[in-house]
Image (cartoon, grey):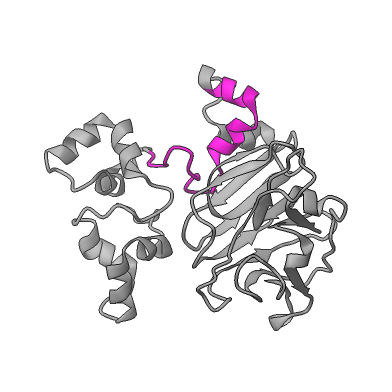
Amino acid sequence: MSFAIFNESFYLANYPDVRAAVEARVITSGLQHFQESGVREGRTLISPSFDEASYLAKYSDVAAAVRSGLFSSGLQHFIDFGEEEGRSGVPLGGPDPATFFNEKAYITNNLDVASAVRLGTDKSGLQHYQQVGQLEGRTGYFTASNASDVVSGFGAKTQIYGVGVTNVVGDIGSSTYDIITTSKGDGEIDTLVGGSGQDQFVLGVGRITSSTTQSNFQSFYLNSKDVGTDDYAIIQNFELGKDTIVLGGTPNQYTLVPNGFGGDYLIYTASNSNLGKRNDLVAVVEGNPNLGLLNPADAVKSGFTLLG
């Protein structure tokens, strides 16, 4: 039996009654609640890396055992036996439980890998990326959940997201760049950790079109109802001259504060921004790199701001 898959912030975000009990100190943690009662109650929203419906659809014997009452849920089976048996509850298109690697995004952007997986030449996109793709300089997509997460990228070239993302199409230099998200970072404090390669920390996106007017964009960690510091990204291991940061919107919508609180580099919304609350903290970049704008010529047209 293992509870290694359990994600405290994800569980509390999905079960407000448990969060209230923890805040009232009736119980010490969401994990305590899940171990003592939640698993028997059939609560299954414990991690972005487990999807009850996918697990039951994949394993008919488990589905039959749940119907018969032998297990309260597929998740209980996974915890008691399934993980040790090598079974997986990763949702379709969801992040890998160990690496947050986005299988769907990688296959979408590498059609040769998609074909190899279908033919059985490669077991998965993750296997290809680990064994071949990262050495070839292919982009690895690392995406998180709708709760606070620590996401670490690895490989020669990565895109790292702290929010929930189901798919990414293209990359920041492509005319088809677009993403599908399941959250915008509201209430999340995510830690994005760069590796030794060329990392791109994505805090928002723009959509490049043939229009000369400003394109549609999406910004993360902005919530007009919070105090401005309830949600943001913490960026670690940023390497100046190699790594980049993507913000949704144009440069004049942000305020960059070198050597801010704690000596780190801070990114806020500007007072003249139309993104929502003014002076809303978007990111803390540890190490206080001397960031500069990398796309001054096309930032308005593209709808995103690229820093590095």
Residue 251 placement: quadrant: bottom right
Q: Is residue 231 left or right of residue 31?
A: right
Q: Is residue 89 magenta?
A: yes
The residue lying at 83 percent from left, 50 percent from top is 298
Residue farthest to the right, as pictured: 297
Q: Position of residue 181 (x, y in %)?
A: 53, 48
For residue 267, say whether it is visible: no
Residue farthest to the top, as pictured: 119
For residue 235, say whether it is visible: yes
Examine the rendered structure and indicate whether residue 142 appears above or below residue 148: above
Q: Position of residue 134 (x, y in %)?
A: 69, 38
Q: Is residue 280 left or right of residue 16?
A: right
The residue lying at 58 percent from left, 38 percent from top is 105
The residue lying at 66 percent from left, 66 percent from top is 274
Q: Is residue 284 magenta?
A: no
Q: How many marks?
A: 0
Q: Position of residue 252 (x, y in %)?
A: 78, 66
- The one nearer the camera, 8 or 3, is 8
- The one nearer the camera, 209 or 15, is 209
Which quarter of the image is occupied by the C terminus? Answer: bottom right
Q: Which residues are magenta?
A: 88-117
Q: Position of residue 164 (x, y in %)?
A: 51, 52
Examine the rendered structure and indicate whether residue 76 appears above or below residue 233: above
Examine the rendered structure and indicate whether residue 36 appears above or below residue 64: below
